[in-house]
Image (cartoon, rainbow, N blue to C red):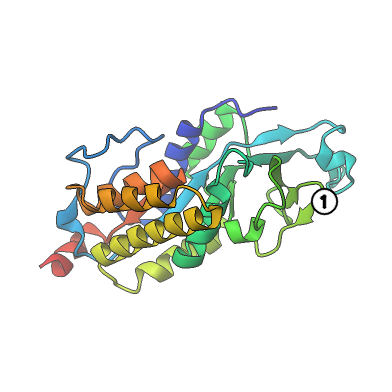
Amino acid sequence: MKSSFSELSYAFALTENLVNSLGLPLLMAPTFPSTAAEGKKGAGHDVKLAMPGMSLFLQFKLSHCMRYASAKEFSSGIFSKKVGGKSEPVYRMYLHPLKSSRQTSLMLKLEKRHGIVYYVAPLFHLPIDLSKHFFAKTVAQESRFIRPSVIKKMPDDNEHFVSFRKTGKPWRFSENPVELEGIETETDVMRRVRKEHMQKIPVNERVSESLEKMFEVLLEEAKERQTGTRVIRNEVARIRGLEMPLLEKASFVARNFFELEMLTIGSEEENADKYSG
């Protein structure tokens, strides 16, 4: 059963819950999906970039609910149809095949350079559950966060998917299914974010570094594919020269080249002045 709510709805609910849990402000409102116009003014807040902060990259995925015994998760014997004597569904998120998208490859390279990069998908698929978890502020708790390095490089150009329950290890289903190690909970992710934030590095340094790392990844990917290198190099130079606020420019590159949402978190408002002077 496919998800009955949109990726936009899930992304908004998850982001709101994450920010609420952190108790720290976003420095720019996310735009879901990629609706930000290049060069559009008014969304960036460069004046705030002197305060400490950090950025994380999220790829929002919707989950398909698998209940029938014919599903590959059950027919392969990898997942039991019942848990504790009760039927328990498995959730599945699809990955872009390499033949149509380089997203997985780009995310792997970005994680090596940046670190905090995740796929995130819900453990529910009905609108009533999205609403319930949103108001209970448990959307993040009822989601699985998976780093690209855990999923690893796709073995071929075919379609692959990752299947999971709330507990236990997820599996990547290819011709030969692979159990995924190194899975993090929502608590682990929040701990990583707070640890990075505690380093008190100014946001402008963080965002500038993230932007340059994204450019490095784009150039490396083009070089590996041995196609479009000159086009990418020219595009990177063009974007560097755009008169856009730094935060808008980095978010624009994340959305339009990586299909990621870059969430940039600042300091608490009451502490911001001492860092911005």
Residue at image location 53% in from the left, 39% down from the top: 133
Give the x, y percent position of residue 171.
Answer: 74, 51
Q: Residue furthest bottom?
A: 199
- In the displayed structure, does residue 156 sit left or right of residue 245? right
Residue type at mark 1: give it.
Asn
Give the x, y percent position of residue 267.
Answer: 27, 61
- In the displayed structure, does residue 97 sit left or right of residue 13? right
Give the x, y percent position of residue 148.
Answer: 58, 56
Q: Judge by depth and name the residue closer to the eye, 212 or 255.
A: 212
**What residue sits right under mark 1 in the picture?**
176
The quadrant in which residue 68 appears is top right
Q: Judge by depth and name the residue closer to the eye, 266 or 20.
A: 266
Can you say which quadrant of the picture contains the N terminus?
Answer: top right
Give the x, y percent position of residue 187.
Answer: 54, 60
Can you say which quadrant of the picture contains the C terminus?
Answer: bottom left
Q: Residue furthest left?
A: 277
Relative to 244, say whether 33 is above or below: above
Element type where label 1 sits in the image: loop
Residue at image location 27% in from the left, 49% down from the top: 239
